[in-house]
């Protein structure tokens, strides 16, 4: 049994808020204090799936995934909307020049957020490879402390759990976080016709002190637009 988990009687246990669990608790409390707003958008990733199937993969390379596409779309949107790629420190909004994406990775003890640096300059295939390497290193406890430092925005994906939507908590001093849900087959109407599409829900939570609703909505729509027109993922910011 973990040192942070103590037996509290037959069939029960208590979990002390210390160590990693304590650090998460303190950071989430700070994030919860911010005047945050959540907004969501449904994205059709049918074309993205087809685009991924058409991508060639070299021997030993990681196969690109929807998660890598979301990271690429987010990085491109952040580069175009720098007010979202920002840190709020001492009542000053510091817009960042480079996009350093934090990627939430679930452990038994809690969440860790390794950082993909200069994500706006990396293609989908490279993001897929780095995502796998960072997730594996995090779960094995092999990454240095600096691997978790310096993120300018966070993406958290719970799609593998099958949930339809959720609202993540801000990771201060970042001013935004994007939650990604499961991809599900849905009936949608396009040009007056009903068809089946692969849909996912994107939920953006942002600090209203740093950015207002309209520019935040523009950023979220940019992420959606990149996912629904995946050829744009090959472009430069």
Image: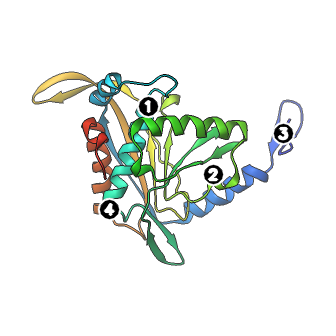
Q: Does dot 4 land on a helix, a strand or a loop?
A: helix
**Cα separation between marks 2 and 3:** 24 Å
How many neighbours does mark 4 have within 10 angstroms: few (below 14), some (14-19), or many (20 or more)? some
Instruction: Name the residue nearer the viewer: 64 or 7.
Output: 64
**Residue that lies at the very extreme toward the left in this rendered image:** 192
Would residue 233 be found to the left or right of residue 178 on screen? Answer: left
Quick one: 226 or 184, which is closer to the camera?
A: 226
Decide which of tag 2 and tag 3 comes sooner along the chain: 3
- For the residues labelled 4 and 1, the Cα–Cα distance comes to 25 Å
Give neighbour class at mark 3: few <14, some 14-19, many 20+ (Cα, 10 Å): few
The disc at residue 2 is: 3
Q: Residue 107: in sight, yes or no?
A: no
Asked whether 67 or 16 is in front, the reply is: 67
Is 77 situated above or below 61? below
Q: Which residue is mark 4?
A: 213
Q: Is residue 192 left or right of residue 184?
A: left
In this figure, which residue is indicated by the disc labeled 1?
Answer: 182
Where is mark 2, residue-wise? 147
Q: Residue at x 27, y 56 (%)?
A: 218
The N terminus - image quarter:
top right
Q: Residue furthest front?
A: 59
CA gap, disc 2 to disc 4? 31 Å
* Residue found 49% across the figure and 78% down from its top: 91
Q: Secondary structure at mark 2?
A: helix
């Amino acid at each position: 049994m973990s040192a942070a988990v103590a037996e509290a009687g037959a069939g029960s246990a208590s979990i002390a808020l210390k160590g990693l669990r304590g650090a998460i608790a303190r950071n989430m409390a700070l994030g919860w204090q911010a005047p945050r707003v959540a907004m969501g958008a449904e994205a059709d990733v049918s074309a993205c799936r087809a685009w991924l199937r058409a991508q060639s993969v070299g021997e030993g390379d990681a196969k690109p995934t929807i998660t890598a596409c979301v990271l690429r779309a987010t990085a491109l949107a952040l580069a175009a909307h720098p007010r979202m790629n920002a840190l709020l420190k001492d009542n000053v909004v510091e817009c960042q020049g480079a996009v350093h994406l934090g990627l939430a990775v679930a452990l038994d003890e809690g969440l860790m957020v390794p950082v993909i640096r200069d994500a706006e300059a990396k293609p989908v295939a490279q993001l897929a490879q780095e995502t796998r390497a960072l997730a594996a290193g995090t779960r094995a406890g092999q990454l240095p402390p600096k691997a978790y430092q310096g993120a300018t925005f966070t993406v958290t994906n719970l799609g593998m759990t099958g949930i339809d939507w959720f609202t993540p908590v801000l990771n201060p001093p970042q001013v935004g976080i994007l939650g990604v849900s499961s991809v599900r087959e849905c009936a949608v109407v396009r040009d007056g016709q009903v068809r089946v599409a692969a849909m996912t829900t994107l939920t953006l939570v942002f600090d209203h002190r740093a950015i207002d609703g309209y520019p935040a909505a523009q950023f979220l729509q940019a992420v959606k637009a990149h996912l629904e027109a995946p050829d744009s993922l090959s472009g430069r910011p």
